[in-house]
Image (cartoon, grey):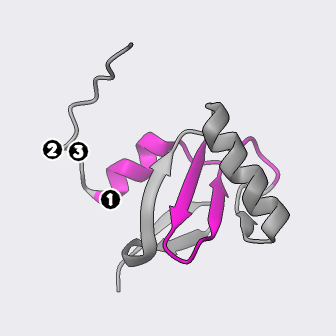
Amino acid sequence: MAFIQIGFGNIVSVDRLICVVSPDSAPVRRIVQDARDRGSLIDASSGKKSKAVLIMDSDHVILSAMPAEDIRRQLGQTDSWSGTEEEP
């Protein structure tokens, strides 16, 4: 089983990770609020501003102060992602 660091000594199982997203959009903020209401939100940001939201297959949502880009680098997906975003 592989793990990645998400900041402040916290680690997450790569096998259970579905996606890593930025917390800036309204839909992601709704996901975070819904998880908070359900009791399945894990705040691993140690009181810092959340820079990434990790969605797990166990229906848990994890907040991290580590930027999503740094987490992506740890996952070793730098070759499969171009780094460009299309704007509508």
Q: Secondary structure at mark 2?
A: loop
Q: Residue furthest bottom?
A: 1
Q: Residue 54 is drawn in which quadrant?
A: bottom right
Real-space Cα separation, disc 3 to disc 1, in angstroms:
8 Å
Image coordinates of residue 43 in percent, x first then y, are: 74, 61
Q: Residue 83 is drawn in which quadrant?
A: top left
Image coordinates of residue 45 in percent, x first then y, are: 72, 55
- The magenta segment is 47-75
Question: Quick check: can you spot residue 70?
Answer: yes
74 left or right, relative to 47: left
Real-space Cα separation, disc 1 to disc 2, in angstroms:
11 Å
Q: Secondary structure at mark 1?
A: helix
36 left or right, relative to 5: right
Say if the magenta span includes residue 64.
yes
Identify the residue under disc 3. Answer: 78
Crowd band around label 1 with a 10 angstrom C-alpha radius: few (<14), some (14–19), many (20+): some
Question: CB of mark 1 within 8 Å of CB of mark 2?
Answer: no
Point out the image quarter for the C terminus.
Answer: top left
Q: Amino acid at mark 1?
A: Leu
Q: Residue 10 is drawn in which quadrant?
A: bottom right
Q: Amino acid at mark 3?
A: Thr
Which residue lies at the image location 48% right of the left edge and 44% below the top edge? 68
Question: CB of mark 3 within 8 Å of CB of mark 2?
Answer: yes
**How many numbered dots are placed on residues in this image?**
3
